[in-house]
Amino acid sequence: MDFIADILLIAGALGAGAYCFILSRRLRRFNDLEKGVGGAVAVLSAQVDDLTRTLSAAQGAASTSTRSLDGLTERAEAVARRLELLVASMHDIPQAAEPEPRREPAHPVVRQAGRPEDHEAGPRAERPAKADNEPDTTPMADPPPPEPVFRRHAPVAAGSAP
């Protein structure tokens, strides 16, 4: 009887050892960092860290925007109050019966761009001298066209084809 009990005890120990060996292999595959759940947990942990940093940056930007918007709102309310006061004060001003006509200058000055033949003979070579109190009536050159606000290409020289 003792012998049979020893054989059963040895068989049970061998079965438990085999079961532990199989469980160890399965657990190693389960926790493998590249293929198993361990890798998925590691990837998810890294993503949680990234999302935490992104969330804190977004909260900082939102709080900065909130402060900026609060300041702009206060300025807009102050301007609105001033505009209301100005509009209210406009009601107190008596209206003029007729607007004043626009005045033209006494002696308009007109100038024209110089011609090349004028420059060859010298400036004002053939023009008569004028009196000190006589207004200058020489034609004035047209002002240059305004520069564009945004330039995509280099400016084109006047007179050249694009």
Image (tube, rainbow, N blue to C red):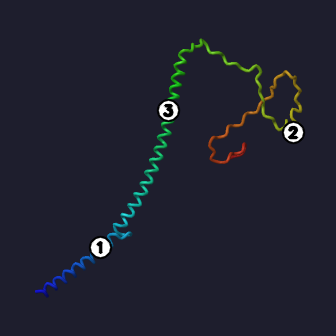
Q: Quadrant of residue 123?
A: top right
SS at mark 3?
A: helix
Q: Which residue, given by chain and number where applicable, does mark 2 sit on?
A: 120
Q: Which residue carries the number 1 mark?
A: 26
Above or below, 130 relative to 19: above
Identify which residue, 143 or 7, lies in the foreground.
7
Q: Residues within 10 Å of mark 1 (few under 14, many from 20)?
A: few
The picture places residue 152, in percent across and down from the top left corner, at 62, 47
Residue 112 left/right relative to 32: right
Q: Quadrant of residue 48?
A: bottom left
Q: Are marks 2 and 1 in contact (CB under 8 Å)?
A: no
| Amino acid at circle 3 | Glu
Q: Earlier in the sequence, mark 1 or mark 3?
A: 1
Rendered location of residue 62, percent (x, y):
46, 44
Q: Residue at x 29, y 73 (%)?
A: 26
Which residue is drawn at the image coordinates 64% and 48% (left, top)? 153
Label 3 – label 2 distance at C-alpha: 65 Å
Label 2: how many residues lie within 10 Å, few (<14), some (14-19) or many (20+)? few
Question: In the image shown, does 107 or 10 lie closer to the viewer?
Answer: 10
Label placed on residue 74? 3
Residue type at tag 2: Glu
Q: For the residues marked 2 and 1, what is the alpha-carbon distance in whole angstroms?
A: 102 Å
Q: Nearer the viewer, residue 87 or 108?
A: 87
Whether residue 129 sits left or right of residue 17 in the image: it is right
Left or right of residue 137, residue 11 in this image: left
Image point (43%, 51%), residue name: 55
